[in-house]
Image (cartoon, helix red, strand yellow):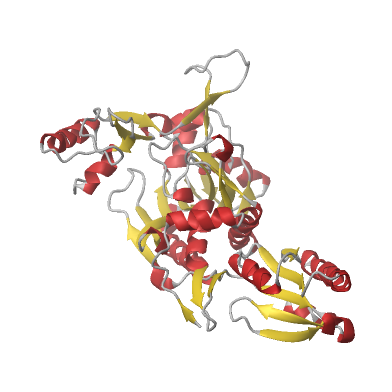
Amino acid sequence: MTINNNKQLNLESIASFCKQNAFVFPSSEIYGGFAAVYDYGHYGYLFANNIKNAWMKSMIQDREDIVALDSGIFMHPITWKASGHVDGFNDPQIDCKTCKARYRADHILEEFGVSADKQPLEFINAELDKLKSEGKLKCANCGNKDFTEAKVFSLMVKTNLGSPTDTLSEENVVYMRPETCGGIYLEYKNVLTSQSMKLPFGIAQIGKAFRNEIVARQFIFRTREFEQMEMQYFHNPKDTKELYEDWKQVRWNWFKEYGIAEDRLHWYKHEKLAHYASDAYDIEYKFKCMKDSFKEIEGIHARGDWDLSQHSKFSGVKLDYFDQITEERFVPHIMETSTGVARQFLMFLDSAYTEENLENGETRLVLKLDKRLAPVKVAVLPLMKKEELSLKAKEVYKKCKEILYNTYQGIVEYDESGSIGKRYRRQDEIGTPVCITIDYDTLKDGTVTVRYRDSMKQERVSVEEIQPYL
């Protein structure tokens, strides 16, 4: 058996794989689709849930200094004024005058070696004018060279709550949260007092966020509706440097623990920091499906006291902390780890996606996922669709479900459709670690065949002794 180097793997083939195997579907496809929004099918739902459960376990079950939170998507609109999102959460946009295609102006300039991150519109338009005069600016969609000037495009998604007759105006606007951490800052004081927390401590949350991206492409890597896993760690500012290094190592190790090869991970240090930040690193992963390019999968940021100070200023509520040991009073600083469920979903798929050339000339496609993340843990398969085999197989299926469900280990699947070879391949493609086959020997001696996904090794095991194998 040899392993292909997956030269043909790209976002299109990954998207096709996800659709064919009930991982991810285009949203509203019968109406032509809805740009940058996706629906998660049965296996995608299970897989994403396993990623979230693994992340939350590492935060609140494996540690004693972090608690969970599930804050509302809607928050008081002043929240986003205080955080700076209303005034500063935007990107520069230009449009092709011919086909109306929309582009991020700063991204276009970066393609020509001009750094435009956080630059004013005047600078961006001046640089765009240079490219226009040189005839270098061309629409990737239609080839036209006539573009609008760059303008500010707000990433905030607006809606309104209240009377259905209310119009959407600045007086009654409510924002769909652009990131989940906003709710964490607003509940910091309640968590501190209700749970008698002492610094340092963290609050972890998983939840939906919404951004009106100018260009949302790259399959599920960048979408307008997405789910974040964020942890905010409140601490004394004198401990920031040490805690920052600790959290960098903790998060790096988490990816390795769940099967990501270290040579495909990379640290990216932000040179341009937000005015309140003292340090910012991203963990990047080298995606096979994106031409072996490194892309951000998680940010670890030292945010200072900006968030609590701003919300204290705008709300009039004191959010400081008194350390009874050192007798210091201060506004806690925050260490943040932030990652997207979809980005991790795509990363784990990309890492696990393997094509193998078998000795019989066939090609086997298999997802070599960590078994804790696999959508289905065990598949029970009668050798063929015969009544006596099906009845016995369903007994084994029920036994496996009792074993795994009682220990919260995951989903067991029953499949009797098609040849046994095709069913093995089907389970390989969705990453099922173990298949259990019931045959006529099972009816005679009570043994089954246990087949392992990665090695394809098979062994006979007594039904009564099957628990350790699961």
Quarter of the rendering containing residue 139? top left
The residue shown at (36%, 44%) is 276
The residue shown at (51%, 18%) is 168
Does residue 35 lie above or below 447 as drawn?
Answer: above
Tell me, yes or no, if residue 326 can be seen here.
no
Position in image of residue 206 (x %, y %): 58, 49
Does residue 243 lie above or below 28 as drawn?
Answer: below
* Residue 358 or residue 57, whichever sits in front: 358
Q: Is residue 438 left or right of residue 376?
A: right
Q: Residue furthest top?
A: 165
Quarter of the rendering containing residue 463? bottom right
Picture quarter with the C terminus: bottom right
The residue shown at (65%, 50%) is 196
Q: How many marks?
A: 0
Position in image of residue 84 (x %, y %): 40, 34
Position in image of residue 83 (x %, y %): 44, 35
Tell me, yes or no, if residue 443 can be seen here.
yes
Does residue 371 lie above or below 76 as drawn?
Answer: below
Does residue 272 lie above or below 90 as drawn?
Answer: below
* Residue 9 or residue 169, whichever sits in front: 9
The residue shown at (76%, 86%) is 460
Position in image of residue 129 (x %, y %): 15, 33
Q: Is residue 201 left or right of residue 116?
A: right
Q: Is residue 65 left or right of residue 307?
A: right
* Residue 2 or residue 305, whichever sits in front: 2
